[in-house]
Amino acid sequence: MMSKAEGIVIRTTDYGETNKIVTLYTKEFGKIGLMARGAKKPKNQLSAVSQVLFYGLCLFRKGRGLGVLYQAEPLNSFRSIREDIEKMGHAALILELTDRLTDERRPSQAYYHLLRDTLLLMEKGTDPAVLSSMYALKMMPLAGIDPVLNRCIHCGNKKDHYLFSISEGGFLCMDCAKFDEYALVMSRAVQKLLPLIRTVPINRLGKVSLKAKTIGEIGSIIYAYYEQNAGIKLRSRRFIEQLSKFNQMND
């Protein structure tokens, strides 16, 4: 039976000399694997579809294992993202995280809309570093590592200033700092922003302007938390860090 669904290509794998396996994240069916026959041939109608970040309506046949992709109609080319190496790096991080955290054929409209709306905002010009950090924080419940960001994780009290404890799982007040000697010092800005960016809906995000130092601090906390508590180390995160160092050397 043929199916049609809106989806975003989050990963592709070469298969043989001419084919590709496309991992499509859809609103209706969740994450599914599809064979795109002949997609490596430049003139094949599936060559453009079988690229990461493709977003459109896809026609396919589902199978017990791999399905088959037949055709697709683009809804947004994400041209601005594709032509900017920094945006593409953060988009790659978002796609990699989606692939790592979602299960096959387990649909979630909420997480699909989060992915789609985040990429659409990036395309429109919202800071890609802010968006990728917001996305990573909002995806933590899927990894089972959602941190406590509104009170001290140890005593439960609300305070004016906290440290961030990766091992304890969130904010740690100064009175309880003794329970984690490796707790991270946060700036006041980061302390206020972490709970805010976790709770504000991505589609209600207005203009965002954060200092590079602030968003860098947020990113460092988020990805250290993923690595230690979920065992997830993102390849695209390393690329972003290398690109940032390169840009600093050339400023």
Image (tube, helix red, strand yellow):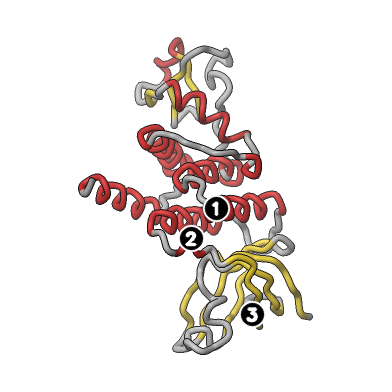
On-image quarter of the N terminus: bottom right
| Residue type pointed to by label 3 | Leu
As helix, strand or loop, the secondary structure at mark 2 comes to: helix
In percent of width and height, residue 240 lies at: 36, 51
Which circle marks residue 124 in the picture? 1
Which circle marks residue 103 in the picture? none
Report the Cα–Cα distance between label 3 and label 2. 26 Å
Label 2–label 1 contact, CB within 8 A: yes
As helix, strand or loop, the secondary structure at mark 1 comes to: helix
Q: Mark 1 Cα within 10 Å, few/some/many (few <14, many 20+)? A: few
In percent of width and height, residue 76 lies at: 60, 65
Up-down relation of residue 176 to residue 221 (above or below): above
Residue 154 appears left or right of 7: left
Up-down relation of residue 23 to residue 176 (above or below): below
Q: Mark 3 Cα within 10 Å, few/some/many (few <14, many 20+)? A: many
Report the Cα–Cα distance between label 2 and label 1. 8 Å
| Residue type pointed to by label 1 | Lys
In percent of width and height, residue 37 lies at: 57, 86
Q: Nearer the viewer, residue 65 or 130?
A: 130
As helix, strand or loop, the secondary structure at mark 3 comes to: strand
Report the Cα–Cα distance between label 3 and label 1. 29 Å
Q: In front: mark 3 or mark 1?
A: 1
Up-down relation of residue 133 to residue 246 (above or below): above
In percent of width and height, residue 192 lies at: 51, 24
Residue reaching furthest right?
1
Mark 2 or mark 3, which is nearer the start of the sequence? 3
Which circle marks residue 80 in the picture? 2
| Residue type pointed to by label 2 | Ser
Q: What residue is pinned by disc 3?
A: 69
Label 3–label 1 contact, CB within 8 A: no
Mark 1 or mark 2, which is nearer the start of the sequence? 2
